[in-house]
Image: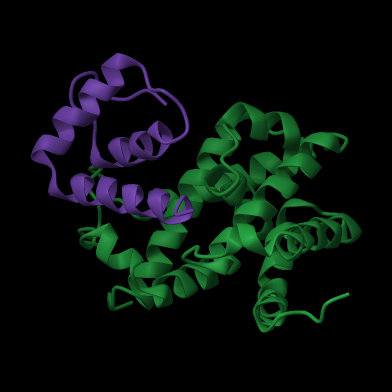
Chain colours: A green, B purple
């Protein structure tokens, strides 16, 4: 068997460095630790088995994350559905979210603060540091919010699919997503766009 | 949530902008949002922030 090429070793090392983040993404969506690790393993193996497929792509990280995404979606769809959460808890959470959202507005319905200007997204996305900050902001979200948010925005499940998989109502999903977006917006304003607290 | 017929507040529009990312709003709500954004800097900026946020996660 031929010795691994330096490219192969290099990719292995890079993948190992990515593993913790990949595991975090998987753990967020797949509550079962073993299944999360399996999904990550499968994704890493998929890349290592076909290094030719990766060659020339802009980012190994983007590539393996893309593969992981499909592994996670498959795992979610093939798993048994979650039980509905305790209604009282869900309603209390929803009420708390509503209050937090309300605090951003004046009694007459105007915003308290003028939202900041985020500028040209293409220029923003050229900066890898932006994505690192964004990742930290997602990590700061409450667990269930992060899960629903990433299910929607990263795995691209539609509302109905999220409701089905997590046994929650669409109204609940929408308010959770709205609140998550507001939190992320606030986090980015503070940590990237330099808005004073 | 009931809101004023022809002139939604920024609070209402912010929520609708977010919801429009997750479901197709009725035509009338889409019209209301568009008209409101036309004259409202705050909601226009918010709408842009949300568009950027969405694109950021679909970068692959």
Residue ID at (81%, 82%):
A3
Q: Position of residue A85 (x, y in %)?
A: 79, 39
Identity of the residue furthest to the top in this view: B27
In the rendered view, tell whether residue B32 sits above or below residue B50: above
Q: Position of residue B23 (x, y in %)?
A: 46, 27
Query: Could you say which is closer to the camera, residue B42 or residue A128?
Result: A128
Query: Could you say which is closer to the camera, residue A4 or residue B23?
Result: A4
Q: Is residue A178 visible?
A: yes
Q: Position of residue A64 (x, y in %)?
A: 64, 61
In the rendered view, tell whether residue A36 sits above or below residue B26: below
**Is residue A1 shown left or right of residue A136?**
right
Quadrant of residue A193 in the image? bottom left
Residue ID at (68%, 59%):
A143
**Is residue A133 shown left or right of residue A45?**
left
Q: Position of residue A186 (x, y in %)?
A: 39, 65
Quadrant of residue B40 in the image? top left
Q: Is residue A141 visible?
A: no
């Amino acid at each position: 068997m031929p010795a691994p090429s330096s490219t192969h070793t290099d990719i292995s090392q890079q993948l190992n460095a990515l593993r913790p983040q990949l595991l975090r993404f998987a753990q967020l969506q797949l509550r079962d630790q073993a299944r999360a690790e399996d999904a990550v393993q499968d994704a890493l193996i998929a890349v290592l088995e076909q290094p030719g497929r990766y060659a020339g792509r802009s980012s190994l990280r983007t590539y393996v994350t893309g593969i992981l995404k499909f592994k996670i979606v498959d795992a979610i769809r093939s798993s048994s559905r979650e039980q509905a959460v305790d209604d009282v808890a869900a309603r209390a959470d929803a009420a708390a979210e509503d209050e937090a959202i309300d605090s951003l507005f004046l009694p007459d319905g105007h915003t308290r603060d003028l939202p900041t200007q985020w500028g040209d997204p293409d220029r923003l996305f050229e900066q890898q540091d932006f994505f690192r900050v964004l990742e930290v902001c997602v990590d700061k979200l409450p667990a269930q919010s992060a899960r629903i948010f990433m299910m929607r925005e990263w795995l691209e499940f539609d509302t109905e699919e999220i409701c089905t998989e997590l046994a929650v109502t669409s109204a609940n999903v929408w308010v959770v997503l709205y609140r998550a977006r507001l939190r992320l917006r606030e986090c980015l304003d503070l940590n990237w766009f330099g808005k004073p607290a | 949530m009931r809101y004023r017929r022809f002139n939604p507040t920024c609070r209402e529009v912010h929520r609708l902008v977010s919801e429009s990312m997750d479901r197709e709003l009725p035509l009338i709500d889409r019209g209301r949002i568009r008209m409101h954004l036309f004259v409202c800097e705050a909601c226009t900026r918010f709408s842009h922030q949300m568009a950027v946020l969405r694109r950021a996660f679909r970068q692959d």
